[in-house]
Image (spheres, rainbow, N blue to C red):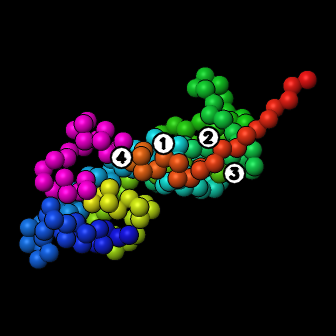
Amino acid sequence: MTPQQLFSKIRMSPEINDNAQVKYSDYQLTDALNTVLSIVFNTLSQSSNELLTSEKDLTLTDGVSSLPADFLSVVNVFAGTKKIDQQSKSLAVDAYTYRIRGNSIYSANDVLTLVYKPYFVEVDDSTLTADLPLPNYFSELLKKYAIISLQGGINKTDTTIVAQISDDVYKLTAGREYGSLEIQQSFRI
């Protein structure tokens, strides 16, 4: 789904009824969509699902590497196949730990695999035909709240609407990735 495809759905909706494209400009639609996408991305970055999760191998020089340009939050960090932990601020990093400071990651390893949540990059004129990084089942949610935004009902600091969007995102994504339980038995001697 591209922003332009979503714009067509928004314009054809009965609430907007803007088939002639005279009520709302592409700029207004882009602004409304960016408002909603920002809230959706922030919600997904704080959830345990794997949507929007990225992975990148980082080569460290003298124990430091720059974080990816779109880095928002850590999911996991691996040195080879071994998961390493975040080090407390009072101890030095070693081969089993990492630390993030500013736009850099520190560790005693040569290569790390960073699994992370990216931050939201706004839609603009150059990305109107690019696919959004969300699955297509988000289209109705994005359409609904973009329409509310166009009608003057959303700003990013309105906690009620942010909570409503977040709740809808959680409902939409709950159970989609991990649909079965895995029973693990442990035996103690």
Q: Which residue is mark 2?
A: 106
Q: Is residue 102 left or right of residue 142?
A: right
Q: CA distance from mark 2 to mark 1?
A: 25 Å
Tell me, yes or no, whether the two marked residues, 4 and 3, touch with CB atoms within 8 Å.
Answer: no
Q: CA distance from mark 3 to mark 1?
A: 27 Å
Q: Earlier in the sequence, mark 4 or mark 2?
A: 2
Q: Earlier in the sequence, mark 4 or mark 3?
A: 3
Tell me, yes or no, whether the two marked residues, 3 and 2, touch with CB atoms within 8 Å.
Answer: no
Residue type at the position of mark 3: Val
Residue 160 is one of the magenta-drawn residues: yes
Quarter where residue 137 is shown: bottom left
Quarter where residue 151 is shown: bottom left
Residue type at the position of mark 1: Ser
Residue 13 x %, y %: 19, 66
Q: Which residue is mark 1?
A: 47
At mark 1, the secondary structure is loop
Read off the magenta span: 144-168
Q: Which residue is mark 3?
A: 111
Q: Which residue is mark 4?
A: 168
Residue type at the position of mark 4: Asp
Q: Specify the quadrant that holds the C terminus.
A: top right
